Amino acid sequence: MNLTDKAIVITGGGQGLGRAMAVNLAKEGAKLALIDLNEESLKETVALIEQAGSSANYYLANVTNEAEVEATFAKISQDFNGIDGLINNAGILRDGMFVKAKDGQVSKKMSLEQFQSVIDVNLTGVFLCGREAAVHMIESGKKGVIINMSSIARGGNMGQTNYAASKAGVVAMTVTWARELGRHGIRVGAIAPGVIRTAMTDAMKPEMRDRLEKMKPVGRLGEADEIAHTVKYIMENEFFTGRVVEIDGGLCM
Ligand code: NAD
């Protein structure tokens, strides 16, 4: 896919990886539709896209809310005359151990609300936005691309029952959609980043970050632009579908 003038939707486009993806795609001439909950950060991303020589609209919406997602994608499709790409990037962390056992006392550590809130954003949000994008792409006859953000945590990780389950589910949906949507000319892929420097990982304890840096053969955390580069590769490569690209500096070899 040549990205010039293509309409690309990015959820969670206000900051972090979503912002880096938006700015990098703007440099290729794509037109961006950014969805997020945070208006101030969305405005900053739009300003950066304009500096990069392209244009963007932003839409305040919660990806977990079916009615909001439907209305937002209908508006985007109208504003941009169809949708060529979606990056399902909005995501949250609410880490915690599953259960705790101390001094003979066993207690539940991860609440149902803590589990469900992460599933709602990271899995249900991806489902709702992916479904809406697919409907609009098929209706307008666009040969679009959907990219879902998974994580290296999808294989299971201490303290991440909710997050790991959501990111494994994202991969399962990616493969299912690649199989179902291929006949409509829609490609679907996933990216599983390692630890990348964003607000999400700035919240980590410094000693944990140091340990992760040392564990990676490249000896550092990843940069948001390195994930944006992978997005561009998937969008442009017409033979890519149904696969997960791991960009983790060698952490999970
Ligand atoms: P971030 O926290 O910096 O940004 C996430 C964005 O999503 C924020 O702007 C937030 O407002 C938005 N968002 C959250 N809930 C939303 C909702 N319900 N509706 C709409 N927008 C919502 O995160 P990031 O580090 O940029 O991560 C982006 C994606 O990449 C996430 O899916 C994350 O799980 C995944 N990921 C990140 C890393 C990393 O190291 N940063 C590693 C693996 C996977």
Image (spheres, grey):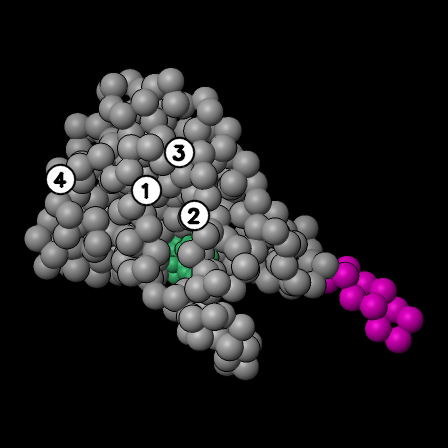
Please name the residue that numbered disc 1 is placed on: 234
Question: Where, quadrant-wise, is the C terminus in this rendering?
Answer: bottom right
Labels 1 and 4 touching (C-beta < 8 A): no
- Identify the image quadrant of residue 182: top left
- Identify the image quadrant of residue 69: top left
Residue 4, numbered label: 4
Question: What secondary structure characterizes most of the magenta part?
Answer: strand
Q: CA distance from mark 4 to mark 3?
A: 21 Å
- Identify the image quadrant of residue 44: bottom left
Q: Is residue 136 left or right of residue 173?
A: left
Q: CA distance from mark 1 to mark 2?
A: 9 Å
Closer to the eye: label 2 or 4: 2
Q: CA distance from mark 2 to mark 4?
A: 24 Å
Mark before the other along the chain sequence, 3 or 1: 1
227 falls in the magenta region = no
Residue 241, numbered label: 3
- The residue drawn where x is 13% and y is 38% is 5
Q: CA distance from mark 3 to mark 1?
A: 8 Å
Q: Position of residue 176 (x, y in %)?
A: 50, 29
